[in-house]
Each structure stands twice: as C-alpha cells, then as structure tokens.
Image: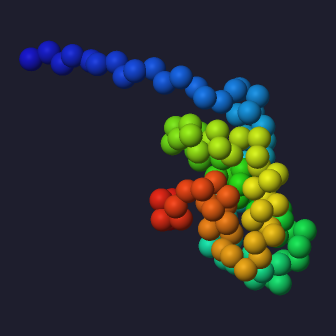
Amino acid sequence: MRKIKVKSPKREKFYTPQEMQTIREKMSGIKVPNNYRNEKVSDLIKEYGEERTKKLIEEEVYLFKNSMILVWDEATYRSMNGKESDMIDYTFKNRNEIMRNSMYEFLGIGVGIFS
C-alpha cells in the first residue's frame, strides 16, 4: 500500500522579519524560564529594587509576545504589538498583584488560559 503525503496548508506569517529579529535580539539576553512571573511585583521590588524589577517585567513581556508567535496566536500577538511599554508600566504600577495576572488583565484575557 502506498502512502499519500498530504501537504499541510502554508501558514501566513503575521509578524515582520524585522519584528522577529528584534525579538531574537532581546531573547538572547533573557534567561528562560523567567520564574518571576508568578510573584507579586511588590515582593520583587523589595528583593531586587525598582530598576531590576522593571527589567524583569520587560523581559517577561517580550517572552510572552514571542511565545504568541511560536504558538501562532495572532490575536494575542496583535493585542500586545506596539503596546509593550504600556503593558510594562501597567504591570509595574500594579505592585500588589502577581506579575502574570497584571499582564493578562492588561490584555483582557483570563488568567487561567495560560497558567
């Protein structure tokens, strides 16, 4: 019996090569996984200070955005694209909230979806 190969449909990229290059550059300096996403921002500030905590949030935002490319979630990617700074600021200002929860709240998605 002869097997018939079925070609999978070609997916259209919803990101530009320049965006992918920028994300790759940022990803190169980020330690994966970032286990700080499950901690309260206030606790991170106490432990690492404000500057380092903001950097941790920034890293997590870029990891999150990149993961949307990897799983082909165009809607979530587009909701983040261009709003990274606002998302970082929102998460940083929500000091008594878990980092990940604030990020999802900013996007208007349920926390349980990605946990």
Can residue 74 be seen at all in this image of the molecule?
A: yes
Residue ID at (88%, 77%): 49
Q: Nearer the viewer, residue 34 or 111?
A: 111
Question: Percent x, y for residue 60?
Answer: 70, 58
Left or right side of 7 for 55: right
Question: Residue 45 location in percent, x, y?
Answer: 83, 78
Q: Which of the 4 image quadrants contains residue 82?
A: top right
Q: Is residue 20 above or below residue 57?
A: above
Indicate the position of residue 36 as horizontal and vertical percent values.
Answer: 68, 71
**Is residue 53 positioned above or below 67 on the image?**
below
In this orientation, does residue 56 appear?
no
Position of residue 63 in the picture relative to residue 55 (left or right)? left
Q: In this view, does 81 lie above or below 17?
A: below
Where is the N terminus found, in terms of image quarters?
top left
Q: What residue appears at the point 67 percent right and 58 percent down from the top-left corner? A: 106
Identity of the residue drawn at 21% across and 16% down: 4
Q: Is residue 103 above or below residue 75?
A: below
Here the colouring is rainbow
Viewer-side residue, 1 vs 83: 83
Residue 88 lies in quadrant: bottom right
- Image coords of residue 105 (percent x, y): 63, 62
Which residue is painted at 68% across and 46% down in the image? 80
